[in-house]
Image (tube, helix red, strand yellow):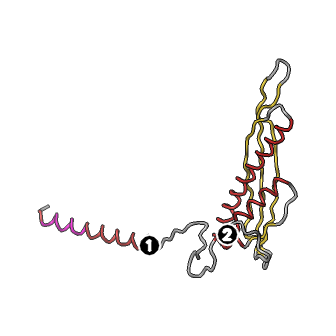
Amino acid sequence: MSLPEARKSNGSLRAVARVALLSSIVLASACTVRPLYSDGPASAGVEAGTATQLASINIKPVNTRYGQEVRNHLIFMFNGGAGQPATAPYSMDLSVASLTESSLLAQVTSKDDEPTAGTVTLTGTYAVTDIKTAKVVASGRRSVTSSYDRPRQEYANMRAQRDAENRAARELAELLRLAIAQEMTKR
């Protein structure tokens, strides 16, 4: 191959590389990235962002103390501390179950084994329903585990368990918010 032929093939290779680069830039410009909790519209045809959709969910009451903790955290995160809307287009059924276990037995004296650590597992199940169509738009189940020390004093043990439940409730509410936001964004 002579030098002029090598330059011609090198030039055509550069042209192909330029066309490939230009086409990849055009394709990449069609992609959009936006924050999950953005309040702006996702596209020209969509009128509400994820934050607005989350604020339009009314969470039904629950029966347990730890369930109420999860519900309160969700209401605060959905609405930024403003409380629930009086009339909302979406309704959310929430149920929270708790499981408390002793996870470690340590020999304190020569004849007694006493639990010294425990775990609390909160499992939240949710279903978000569109009130107009009575159709479930988001549903799922999430679990969170929180560990705590179990001291010998009864009151201290109860308080440590409650603190673990409160920590788990906060974390569960954050997981539920993320899961619901992701599902509402897909709509």
How packed mark 2 is, by other alpha carbons closer than 10 Å (few <14, some 14-19, many 20 or more), is some
Q: Residue at x 82, y 20 (%)?
A: 109
Horizontal and vertical percent for residue 95?
82, 58
Q: Is residue 84 magenta?
A: no
- Asked whether 181 or 171 is in front, the reply is 171
Magenta stretch mostly in which secondary structure? helix
Residue position for label 2? 184
Above/below status of 32 relative to 178: below
Location of residue 3 by image quarter: bottom left
Mark 1 or mark 2: whose residue is earlier in sequence: 1
Residue type for callout 2? Met
Q: Residue at x 78, y 31 (%)?
A: 116
- Asked whether 187 or 17 is in front, the reply is 187
Query: How much space separates mark 1 and mark 2, taking CA atoms?
Result: 25 Å
Region in magenta: 4-12
How packed mark 1 is, by other alpha carbons closer than 10 Å (few <14, some 14-19, many 20 or more), is few
Residue type for callout 1? Ser
